[in-house]
């Protein structure tokens, strides 16, 4: 017995330095986190501001805000972008007992973890301005999925199951809402992010649950795309009803809490940015994000609305996100491939353009009242990827976005149709076809693609049959999407391959008299190597 005890103690002594080293070591592009406790004799005061100033191993200075995490605890999170020893110092205002002038250090090391963020760094707008890339210059293809209610209403095991499915299908990003809104008045347990209106009270318990959902996203190599405040008109949406100062307070809290995660921010969801509302969100974003470095920002507007011109000179806006919506008439289809976005992308070339909300699969259309099929989703997705410099697109499925657990119409979304439970909607065919979409673009330097209508000698007259074309900057590869098959005449000599977006399989393409004929009357992609 004595021998066993000695052996156990000896093993523990051997392991202790390893455990301590691991606890004190932060991965490069990982997250340093530290809690600060106020003097227990003082009364909790969530309004206390706490700033942490950091100095990098090469002497660069950084400043991050800590956030109140309940009781007498303030917490800071920071993503180190340099390996080596970092030093920090706290500044509390007003000077609050126990929080001010704390000092310390931590060590950041490179890791062999295969997670895309540890390997390549944070996601940012590329130097070219046309797409996203990691810090090391590796292009990042945005293939998003829409789970507005997912982080709010999911059980932990269900969230993991969903994320595993999306990773297997090559999705790279997930869009979700981070506070209560019209389709989720609280989370699964009935907790809300905040209470009040003129003077809100933040609920840390709500966000501790959200922490786990966002951690799970990043751990699986998925970029988190949180909507900070849903902002369409309505008393259920905090981005609409909160006074500006309280909206700013809540968004600053969210930035402090999740700014060290791998994210792209959506400050406002599903609103218009024209006139007074546009000025309101300009003021909010300038105040929230300021001049400090931050993750990229994209706005999510209402359907078929553009704000590029409105915010063209605003440096805080990094990505032009748009919503083509859930229509299926000629005007809706034309808007996707030939509307204002296609025109603006030629003029405003220093921001990526991404369709954040094409039609959701199985969602009832505004016009025909038919449910959007996998073909409808594919068509909108490929049009969206080729109507501007290719950067990415977001998929959506009815039942996933609202996270239904039984078949029913989503809350306060009358007319959208009975939605399948999320576990069934997860298997709709369009999501599998997103994997094939990823496969196709991974077969070429997609970040060099630019729209090129000159490749097509005769364009279809019907909006539903529009053929989208793009060519690389080097002029060596071209891509053409044919929604209904048929024959196409190319005005250059080329070797081609047909790609089936339903199966992910390739077929040889033979050029005869300058023409290529699609294998069937369904939609096809033609990849051309130009001579």
Image (tube, helix red, strand yellow):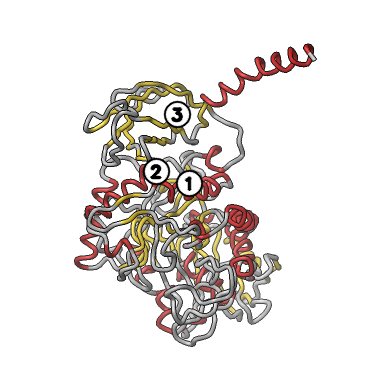
Q: Say which element carries label 1.
A: helix
Spot occupied by residue 473 in the image (x, y as percentages of width and height): 47, 55
Question: On screen, 289 above or below 92?
Answer: below
For the residue labelled by badge 2, is the local secondary structure a helix, a strand or a loop?
A: helix
Q: Nearer the viewer, mark 3 or mark 2?
A: 2
Picture residue at 38% right of the left edge, 22% below the top: 87
What percent of the width, then of the height, locates residue 519? Answer: 68, 77
**Residue 81, numbered circle:** none
Q: Quadrant of the N terminus?
A: top right
Residue that label 1 marks: 211
Of residue 511 and residue 325, the one placed in the foreground of this image is 325
Camera-near label (1 vs 3) is 1
Residue 365 shown left or right of residue 255 in the figure: right
Name the residue furthest bottom: 368
| Residue at 42% across, 79% down | 332
User: Disc 2 marks which residue?
Assistant: 257
């Amino acid at each position: 017995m004595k021998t066993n005890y000695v052996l156990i103690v000896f093993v523990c002594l051997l392991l202790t330095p390893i455990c301590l080293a691991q606890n004190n070591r932060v991965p490069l592009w990982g997250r340093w986190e530290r809690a600060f406790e106020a003097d227990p004799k003082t009364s909790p005061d969530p309004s206390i501001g706490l700033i942490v100033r950091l100095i990098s191993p090469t002497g660069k200075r950084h400043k991050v805000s800590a956030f109140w995490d309940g009781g007498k605890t303030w917490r800071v999170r920071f993503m180190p972008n340099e390996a080596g020893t970092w030093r920090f110092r706290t500044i509390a205002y007003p000077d609050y007992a126990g929080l001010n002038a704390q000092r310390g250090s931590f060590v950041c090391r490179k890791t062999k973890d295969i997670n895309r963020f540890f390997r390549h760094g944070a996601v940012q707008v590329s130097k070219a301005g046309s797409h996203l890339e990691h810090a090391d210059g590796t292009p990042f293809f945005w293939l998003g999925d829409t789970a507005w209610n997912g982080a709010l209403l999911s059980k932990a095991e269900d969230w993991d199951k969903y994320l595993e499915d999306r990773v297997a299908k090559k999705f790279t990003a997930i869009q979700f809402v981070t506070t209560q809104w019209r389709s989720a008045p609280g989370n699964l347990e009935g907790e809300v992010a905040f209470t009040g209106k003129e003077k809100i009270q933040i609920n840390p318990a709500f966000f501790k649950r959200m922490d786990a959902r966002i951690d799970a996203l990043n751990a699986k190599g998925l970029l988190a795309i949180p909507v900070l405040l849903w902002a369409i008109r309505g008393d259920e949406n905090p981005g609409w009803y909160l006074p500006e100062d309280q909206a700013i307070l809540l968004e600053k809290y969210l930035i402090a809490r999740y700014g060290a995660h791998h994210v792209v921010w959506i400050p406002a969801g599903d609103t218009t940015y024209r006139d007074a509302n546009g000025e309101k969100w300009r003021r909010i974003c300038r105040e929230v994000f300021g001049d400090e470095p931050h993750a990229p920002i994209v706005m999510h507007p209402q359907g078929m609305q553009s704000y590029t011109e409105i915010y063209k000179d605003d440096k805080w806006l990094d990505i032009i996100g748009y919503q083509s919506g859930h229509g299926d008439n000629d005007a809706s289809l034309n808007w996707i491939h030939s509307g204002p976005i296609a025109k603006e992308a030629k003029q405003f070339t220093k921001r990526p353009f991404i369709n954040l909300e094409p039609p959701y699969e199985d969602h009832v259309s505004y016009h025909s009242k038919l449910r959007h099929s996998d073909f409808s989703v594919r068509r909108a997705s490929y049009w969206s990827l080729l109507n501007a410099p290719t950067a990415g697109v977001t998929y959506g499925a009815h039942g996933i976005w609202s996270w239904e657990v039984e078949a029913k119409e989503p809350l306060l979304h009358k007319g959208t149709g009975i939605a399948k439970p999320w576990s069934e909607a997860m298997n709709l065919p369009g999501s599998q076809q997103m994997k094939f979409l990823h496969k196709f673009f991974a077969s070429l330097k997609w970040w060099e693609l630019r729209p090129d209508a000159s490749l097509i000698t005769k364009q279809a007259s019907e909006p539903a049959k529009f053929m989208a074309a793009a060519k690389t900057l080097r002029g060596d590869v071209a891509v053409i999407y044919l929604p209904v098959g048929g024959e196409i005449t190319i005005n250059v000599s080329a070797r081609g391959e047909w790609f089936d977006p339903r199966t992910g399989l390739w077929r040889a393409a033979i050029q005869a008299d300058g023409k290529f004929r699609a294998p069937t009357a369904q939609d096809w992609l033609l990849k051309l190597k130009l001579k």
